[in-house]
């Protein structure tokens, strides 16, 4: 008897970091992107009552960005992913800044159609365009080059060498192709009555922070998540605060920023990380009391609930 999730949904999928980790315990997106939940994937799954590697019978990813959708298509098509990786390897001997300029000059990513070279082009440009404080990656984003020197995510110039094609290419095909359906607009989906065990996750643009290229304000995504809850799914929302409108409906909140794995947010104004859940969390991080605190005075508890 399988314990795979019947359907796992990401309504603002981005690089689908949670789906990858659900499918394989060590899988990570091959491309970094602002706001990706790679460092929080394990703790979010745990709060959902899931575990890395548990898998799902099917996935649904909604993502409006054409370049990111190209990457998502590569997750479900081994032949496409392998071809894109081979193309990226073929660029390894080119001068990085010249390669950046040549690929960028071809314009914004196009999807559809789904083409291996376009997957490769977007992947490389997304890696080389990701900059602190900017909402866009890929051909529309600012370069990570400054006077010929590589710029790190924290804004340091010339402190590290550029991440090259030889580093990016092996990150493809980390797990078997995922059985996924891909859509471009979460608002266009009318969920049917769902079987037990369906989980829906949304990582929308955070309120009063750097936005994404495609607007999806809180006033529009809250009705979407309520619709999925009414259809029978457990719904989990990431934000920098509990969502007041959902908390008023009896939803549950859990703070998780202390559980982030990997590099901490050192350059982001947004440090708090909350989940707002339609069902009680299956696990909560431990509450750390101050050195002189007394549990009976502070109301804090040690251990997980």
Image (spheres, rainbow, N blue to C red):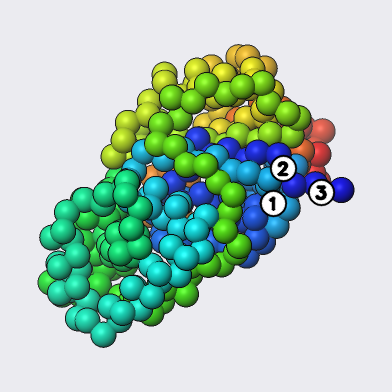
**In which quarter of the view is residue 63 placed?**
top left
Q: Horizontal placement of 103 versus 279: left or right?
A: left
Q: Earlier in the sequence, mark 2 or mark 1?
A: 2
* Quadrant of the drawing holding the C terminus: top right
Q: Is residue 87 above or below residue 217?
A: below
Q: Residue at x 38, y 67 (%)?
A: 84
Q: Position of residue 276 (x, y in %)?
A: 60, 30
Mark number, residue 203: none
Residue farthest right in this picture: 1
Q: Which residue is mark 2?
A: 5
Q: Nearer the viewer, residue 60 or 236?
A: 60
Mark 1 to mark 3 CA distance (whole Å): 10 Å
Q: Residues within 10 Å of mark 1 (few under 14, many from 20)?
A: many
Q: Which residue is mark 1?
A: 55
Q: Position of residue 198 (x, y in %)?
A: 68, 34
Q: Position of residue 35 (x, y in %)?
A: 43, 47
Marks 2/1 in contact by CB < 8 Å: the verdict is yes
Residue farthest top in this picture: 248
Residue farthest bottom in this picture: 93
Q: Secondary structure at mark 3?
A: loop
Q: Position of residue 27 (x, y in %)?
A: 58, 63
Q: Nearer the viewer, residue 128 or 283?
A: 128
Q: Residues within 10 Å of mark 2 (few under 14, many from 20)?
A: some
Q: Secondary structure at mark 2?
A: loop
**In which quarter of the view is residue 168 placed?**
bottom left
Mark number, residue 2: 3
Marks 1/3 in contact by CB < 8 Å: the verdict is no
Q: Nearer the viewer, residue 21 or 254?
A: 21
Q: Nearer the viewer, residue 158 or 212?
A: 212
């Amino acid at each position: 008897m399988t314990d795979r999730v019947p359907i796992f949904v990401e309504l603002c999928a981005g690089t689908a970091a949670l789906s990858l980790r659900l499918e394989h315990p060590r899988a990570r997106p091959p491309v970094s992107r602002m706001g990706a939940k790679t460092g929080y994937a394990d703790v979010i799954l745990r709060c959902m009552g899931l575990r890395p590697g548990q898998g799902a019978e099917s996935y649904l990813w909604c993502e409006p960005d054409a370049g990111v959708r190209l990457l998502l298509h590569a997750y479900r098509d081994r032949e496409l992913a392998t071809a894109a990786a081979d193309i990226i390897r073929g660029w390894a001997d080119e001068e990085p800044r010249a390669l950046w300029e040549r690929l960028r000059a071809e314009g914004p990513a196009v999807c559809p159609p789904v083409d291996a070279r376009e997957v490769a082009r977007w992947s490389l440009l997304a890696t080389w365009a990701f900059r602190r404080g900017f909402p866009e990656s890929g051909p529309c984003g600012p370069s990570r080059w400054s006077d010929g020197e590589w710029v790190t995510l924290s804004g340091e110039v010339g402190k590290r060498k550029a991440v090259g094609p030889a580093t990016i290419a092996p990150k493809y095909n980390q797990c078997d192709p995922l059985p996924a359906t891909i859509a471009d607009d979460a608002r266009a989906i009318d969920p049917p009555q769902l079987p037990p065990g369906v989980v829906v996750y949304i990582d929308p643009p955070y309120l009063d922070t750097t936005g994404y290229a495609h607007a999806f304000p809180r006033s529009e995504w809250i009705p979407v998540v309520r619709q999925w809850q009414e259809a029978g799914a457990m719904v989990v929302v990431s934000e920098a605060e509990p969502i007041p409108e959902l908390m008023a409906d009896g939803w549950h909140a859990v703070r998780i920023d202390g559980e982030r794995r990997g590099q901490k947010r050192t350059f982001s104004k947004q440090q708090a990380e909350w989940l707002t859940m339609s069902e009680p969390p299956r696990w909560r991080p431990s509450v750390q009391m101050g050195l002189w605190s007394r549990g009976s005075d502070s109301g804090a508890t040690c251990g997980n609930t």
